């Protein structure tokens, strides 16, 4: 999950232009509102278990944190929910080695357990490793 204030848009079926020599977690770039943005595959970047299908993910969440902007590829964007701070707890279940450095918290949602990402940390780390 993401802080909704950091989400600029959720796009369906965005065409991605590959970048020769880009790291595997950056499958290419997209264009959004006259800006070219890197597309970040969080699953690849965080070394999460691979999806069975290798087809491009159907949705892109355009995010910004400080000066950094990117598109995050995802299977679905389930919606926006408002959570009280008391609904957030330290991550204890969603602690995979690659994802743990970027998790601020976790919470129960109508769709199940959700990790809350530290977007600034994630985008900075992806930029450094690019």
Image (cartoon, rainbow, N blue to C red):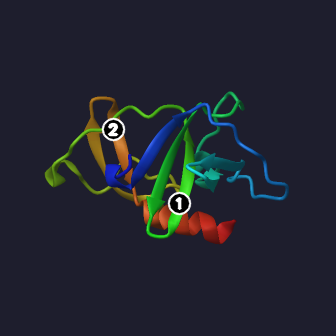
- Side of 122 where 23 appears, left or right: right
Left or right, 15 with respect to 20, comes to: left
- State the quadrant of the C terminus: bottom right
| Quarter of image, res 49 | top right
Name the residue located 75 percent from the left edge and 58 percent from the top edge.
23
> Can see residue 59?
yes
Q: Residues within 10 Å of mark 1 (few under 14, many from 20)?
A: many
Foreground: 79 or 108? 79
Tell me the residue at 54%/32% (across/down).
Answer: 75
- List x then y, in percent, for residue 43: 59, 46
Which structural element holds mark 2? Answer: strand
Q: Tell me what residue is drawn at x 56 percent, y 55 percent.
A: 70
Dot 2 alpha-carbon crowd within 10 angstroms: few under 14, some 14 to 19, many 20 or more:
few
- The residue pinned by badge 1 equals 69
- Rendered location of residue 64, percent (x, y): 46, 59
User: Image height check: is 52 above or below 80?
Assistant: above
Asked if residue 47 shows in the view, the reply is no
Relative image position of residue 7 (x, y in whole percent): 41, 50
Labels 2 and 1 touching (C-beta < 8 A): no
Q: Depth-wise, is mark 2 or mark 1 nearer the camera?
A: 1
Q: CA distance from mark 2 to mark 1?
A: 26 Å
- Up-down relation of residue 58 to residue 38 (above or below): above
Element class at badge 1: strand
Query: Which residue is farthest front?
Result: 34
Marker count (numbered): 2
Q: Position of residue 82 (x, y in %)?
A: 21, 43
Give the left or right position of residue 92, taking residue 74 as reference. Answer: left
Q: Which of disc 1 and disc 2 is earlier in sequence? A: 1
Which residue lies most toward the right here?
20
Q: Which residue is mark 2?
A: 113
């Amino acid at each position: 999950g993401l802080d909704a204030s950091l989400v600029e848009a959720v796009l369906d079926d965005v065409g991605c232009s590959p970048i020769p020599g880009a790291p595997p977690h950056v499958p290419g770039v997209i264009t959004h509102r006259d800006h070219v943005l890197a597309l970040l595959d969080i699953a690849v970047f965080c070394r999460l278990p691979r999806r069975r299908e290798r087809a491009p993910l159907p949705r892109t969440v355009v995010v910004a944190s400080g000066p950094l902007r990117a598109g995050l590829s995802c299977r679905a964007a389930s919606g926006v929910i408002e959570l009280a701070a008391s609904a957030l707890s330290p991550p204890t279940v969603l602690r995979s080695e690659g994802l743990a450095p970027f998790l601020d918290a976790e919470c129960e949602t109508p769709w199940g357990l959700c990790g809350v990402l530290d977007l600034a940390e994630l985008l900075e780390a992806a930029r450094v490793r690019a």
